[in-house]
Amino acid sequence: MPGVRALVAGHADFAAGLISAVEAVTGRGEMLEPIQVKGLCGEDIQLLLKDRLHATGAAVIFTDLQAGSCTMAARRLLREEPQVVLVSGTNLPMLLDFVMSSMPDTHDAARTAVERARSAIAAYGGPA
Amino acid sequence: MTLVLNRIDDRLIHGQVVVGWGQPLDVRFIVLVDDAVAASEWEKELYRMGVPPEMEVRFHSAAEAAPLLDVYRTEPHPGILLTGDIATMHELVLHGGVREVNIGGIHHRAGRQQYLRYVFLTQDEQRALRAVAALGALVTAQDVPAARAIPLEEMLSEAEVS
């Protein structure tokens, strides 16, 4: 089993919640590291993300909102870390696809997971 | 409509601003006042990409913004005035007619003491907020609309996390 391949960062317990769901479904939660940013300013979020990228060797950052402070901090970080892929709008199907991917390249795995997650969104029922 | 919220938030545009306040108040524009952001095309693009298509962001330095606020107050749709620090908001209270100030987020940094989950201040910043209030502005802390607006003095009297 590979180590941490991606960081997950977002509002409140978004990261821990999604990772607990990934663990429950696949047993591969350890491939994702949750980033807790409560109380941190944007600059400190950026420093934390950088530190955890270097410490874990992760190549991808998954975030929640496009305008969220984690996404903003990660976009700034990408200027110094151009090898990292940032994905916003993260959902559970995306992370499941990512951790189950057999692609050797983590970036490819992330991009493929984005496409699969997009196709997993649907609305059912209700008046036509 | 007018500027419906005058907010100090060191994260500037982020989820609470765009979704938390922006959606219930039907905000169509954000006036982002920050000297560093106003001077950088890259920074401006970063913030523009963070908002939905129906929301516009206008960037100004503190000096530029003050005389423009009256014009923004005549816009047909609601807008949010946003600064990243207390000093910039102080300028806008002094020269831009701002009468109500929302402390939305001043986060942890070395030398700051915690007052609320989302407010950390140095002694100087405490004094700076009191100086804003002394100009006649109503200063309260409130991160999201569903939370209670906490008056400045009540917040400062709480040394611990509430």
Image (cartoon, coloured by chain):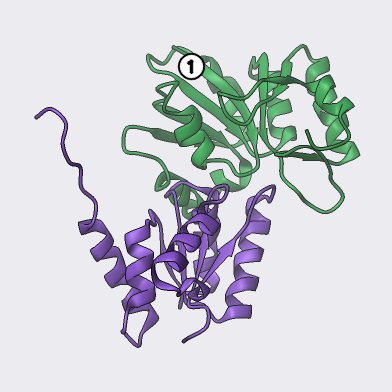
Chain colours: A purple, B green
Please give left or right for residue B46 compared with residue A118 in the image: right
Q: Position of residue A89 (x, y in %)?
A: 38, 53
Depth order, front residue of A76/A39: A39
Q: Amino acid at mark 1?
A: Val
Q: Position of residue B73 (x, y in %)?
A: 49, 14
Please give left or right for residue B138 compared with residue B128 in the image: left
The local crowd at label 1, few if under 14, some if 14 to 19, many if 20 or more residues have their Cα within 10 Å, is few
Please give left or right for residue B21 compared with residue A120 in the image: right
Q: Position of residue A65 (x, y in %)?
A: 44, 48
Tell me which residue sits at (83%, 36%) in the image.
Answer: B125
Tell me which residue sits at (68%, 58%) in the image.
Answer: A44
For label 1, the residue is B71
Q: Quadrant of residue B53?
A: top left
Depth order, front residue of B105/A115: A115
Tell me which residue sits at (66%, 16%) in the image.
Answer: B100
Q: Is residue B35 above or below residue B28?
A: below
- Which image quadrant: the C terminus of chain B? top right
Q: Is residue A75 above or below residue B101?
A: below
Q: Is residue A92 above or below residue B76?
A: below
- Helix, strand or loop status at disc 1: helix
Q: Position of residue A38 (x, y in %)?
A: 65, 49
- The chain identifier of the residue carrying mark 1 reads B
Depth order, front residue of B79/B112: B112
